Amino acid sequence: MINIRPVSDLRNKFTEIENEVKQGQPVYLTKNGYGSMVVLSLEQYAALTDEIEIRLDEADKAAAADGARYTEDEVFGKVRKRMNGHKAI
């Protein structure tokens, strides 16, 4: 079940939120009835971002080894085409 709490609980009931997060359950915080943030454990956050960090490191290494440079329009034009179902150039 999704755990939604007002952001004031972060200050007033920190220990409860901390215990829930440590048990692997993210806590969604609202401010004035609207979503404000999500509190995750370090393990949950790492699970979401580790693969991205690895891919970015690989891209940095590939860019350093390759002398080719592309303009913003070339890069994002290719991305837009791929997202719209066209074959990669």
Image: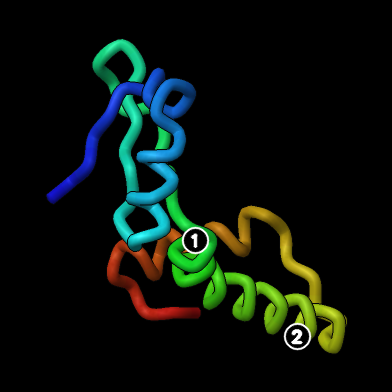
User: Which residue does the numbered mark 1 point to in the structure image?
Assistant: 45
Q: Position of residue 65 (x, y in %)?
A: 85, 88
Quick one: label 1 or label 2, which is nearer the N terminus? 1
In this rendering, the answer to whether 36 lies above or below 45 is above
- The front one of 40 and 15 is 15
- Element type at mark 2: helix
Residues 28 and 51: in front is: 28
* Lateral position of residue 66 relative to residue 3, left or right: right
How many marks the image carries: the answer is 2
Asked whether 27 or 33 is in front, the reply is 27
When asked about the image quadrant of residue 24, the answer is bottom left
Instruction: Decide if residue 78 is in sight here.
Output: no
Mark 1 packing: few (<14 Cα in 10 Å), some, or many (20+)?
few
Rate crowding at label 2 as few (under 14), some (14 to 19) or many (20 or more) other CA atoms within 10 Å.
Answer: few
Quarter holding residue 17: top left
Q: Give residue 35's quadrant in the image.
A: top left
62 with respect to 17 (left or right): right
Q: Of the residues shown, which amino acid type is indicated by label 1?
A: Tyr
